[in-house]
Amino acid sequence: MSKAIFFLTLLVVTLITVPLQAKDIWKITSLNWEPYSGDAMTHQGNSIQKLRAILNAEGVKLVVEFYPWLRAKEVARKKGYIGYFPAWPEEVIEGFVGSKPIDWSEVAVMKRGDTQVEYNSIDKLFEVYSIGLVKTYIYPEIIDSRIQKYTKNIEWSSNEYSLLKMLASGRSHVAITDPSVMLYLSEKEGISDIEVLTVLMEKELVIAFRNDEENLKKLKWLNNFLIKLQN
């Protein structure tokens, strides 16, 4: 099933399903990772909107608190929180369990339009060029293993805005991040010469549920509901 059809099905189910737990509230933490999530965005971001539609289908209210990413994970450990979202599976840390995908992200190599970058393997990319990355992210293994191998060519940034500025100013030859995020921010900042060089992979965006008995029941319900939506 395509993502577009899946979301249309979700909206229909949201309209026709009778709420089962009208007073249930799920509280999660998140980060400003526009356009997927953001406290200043309409509906708090595209992925938050999809999650809210899923929960509304069963009368569950979603409450989202926004923090810097590391802080969001720590706050989500506290009683009263379901967990944190959106997360790549690699971002589901100890003490949490990942859900089935709520939405999808991509990981891509980004560059400036006036920069020539050529490579025939991930190793060659990391060996030859300086690579901009966000320090607080846990990257997929194919990237993380190269980070450990080519440490001298890594340029760390504190967040996506810093990563964009680093790439735009020439401090790194390329940046590796979600292309939707960087292109959204570049348009917002009036930076017009950022482009996608290569999409490396598609990544699930999951909820990281705090691993306790009550939350695991909610996780099981959500996963079963997502399976029904896809069938």
Image (spheres, rainbow, N blue to C red):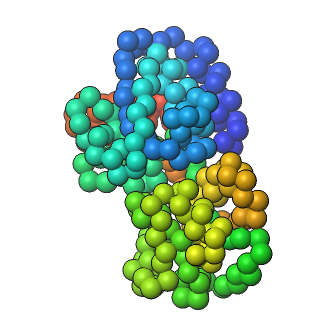
The reply, left or right, for residue 173 in relation to residue 226 is right
Q: Nearer the viewer, residue 146 or 22?
A: 146
Q: Which of 126 and 99 is in front in this view?
A: 126
Report if residue 231 is visible in the image.
Answer: no
Task: Say above or below: 166 vs 78.
Answer: below
Give how far across and how far down residue 76 sits, in percent: 30, 40
Q: Which of 217 and 166 is in front in this view?
A: 166
Task: Say above or below: 21 vs 54.
Answer: above
User: How many numbered discs sit on the rendered protein?
Assistant: 0
Tell me the quadrant of the picture where the C terminus can be found.
Answer: top right
Q: Quadrant of residue 172?
A: bottom right
Q: Which of 226 and 86 is in front in this view?
A: 86
Residue visible at 53% across and 61% down in the picture: 162
Give how far across and how far down residue 9 sits, in percent: 65, 28
Give how far across and how far down residue 135 sits, in percent: 42, 64
Q: Quadrant of residue 29?
A: top left
The reply, left or right, for residue 125 in relation to residue 197 is left
Tell me the quadrant of the picture where the N terminus can be found.
Answer: top right
Q: In which quarter of the image is residue 224?
A: top left
Give how far across and how far down residue 164 sits, in percent: 60, 62
Residue visible at 72% across and 58% down in the picture: 191
Residue visible at 58% across and 45% down in the picture: 34
Report if residue 52 is visible in the image.
Answer: yes
Residue visible at 38% across and 12% down in the picture: 23
